[in-house]
Amino acid sequence: MLYLLTTYQSIGIILPTNRLVGKKATFMRLRMPGKSEITTKDKILKAAARLFSEKGYNEVTTRQIAKAIGINSASIYYHFPSKEDILRGLYKYYSKSLREKCPNLEELLRLAETEPPHEVLKKTEFHFDDDIREMLDQILVASARRLGSDAENERFIRENLFNPIMCVVKPLLERMVELGKIKPLDIEAFLSVMSYFCFSAAALNQSSFGLSVKQYQAAMYFMFSLIVPMGGGYGCETEF
């Protein structure tokens, strides 16, 4: 999901979470990428992600964040100079998590030469670990609530949701067409549909409209089925 919205997380398809519809969000144990211990700074980010997604960035104060983790409000400024820096910290956390999960384009292009097209496309999907999925969803929700409010927020969405799809799936599809493995298609239009679906899925995932992993994958595989293999048995018999 593709790196999708969703902070769903697939290649992208970003499929950050497998929360079922109607399941109440829980305050999960946070594991920051590359860390084994949870620091106060980590806890601040975790609480901020939850509060920003629930109430909106503008409605949350540093005092509320501090109260959520049981520290003095002044202590927050030891870790983050301002609330804006907390938000930037969340964006950096999401970006780092995504980079660690991004599929290897060179490997995908190599597989495209020998593997059925649909099988290669399925390899663009990935899932974040259970202990960070909910937080990544919350960051996306918080970001979605700020659409149109500032350029930095929109840059975050573009770089972490739309660009990964364009940078991985686009060259992969172009290579498959060049190799004669799939019928030519309007790649830009296809990626636009995929990008907006992923973004919508991730943004809604903290609500009653959220999709389970199975539902999300079914939708993604349906979109992949629109890619038509060229003869030779490549992917024609593949079932998603």
Image (tube, grey):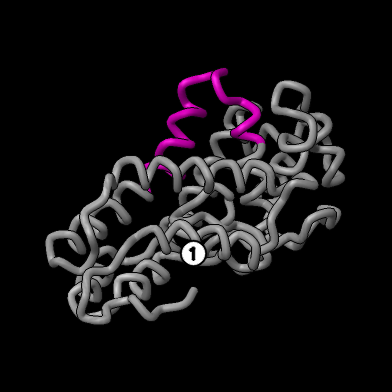
Q: Is residue 182 left or right of residue 164?
A: left
Instruction: Look at mark 1 in the image and give the residue it sits on.
Output: 221
Q: Decide whether residue 157 is among the magenta residues.
A: yes
Amino acid on which disc 1 is placed? Tyr
Q: Picture quarter containing residue 168?
A: bottom left
Q: Is residue 101 left or right of residue 7?
A: left
Local SS, label 1: helix
| Residue 129 pos. (x, y %) | 60, 68
Q: Residue at x 27, y 78 (%)?
A: 234
Nearest to the observer: residue 122 or residue 239: 239
10 Å crowding of disc 1: few (<14), some (14-19), many (20+) = some
Q: Picture quarter containing residue 30?
A: bottom right
Q: Report if residue 132 is visible in the image.
A: no
Range drawn in magenta? 142-164
Image height check: is 221 above or below 98?
Answer: below
Nearest to the observer: residue 11 or residue 143: 11
| Residue 40 pos. (x, y %) | 71, 50
Nearest to the observer: residue 177 or residue 57: 177
Q: Is residue 81 left or right of residue 30?
A: left
Q: Decide whether residue 174 is among the magenta residues.
A: no
Q: Main secondary structure of the magenta part?
A: helix
Image height check: is 5 above or below 81?
Answer: below
Nearest to the observer: residue 9 or residue 76: 9
Q: Report if residue 192 is visible in the image.
A: yes
Q: Residue at x 84, y 57 (%)?
A: 23
| Residue 78 pos. (x, y %) | 66, 36
Number of numbered markers: 1
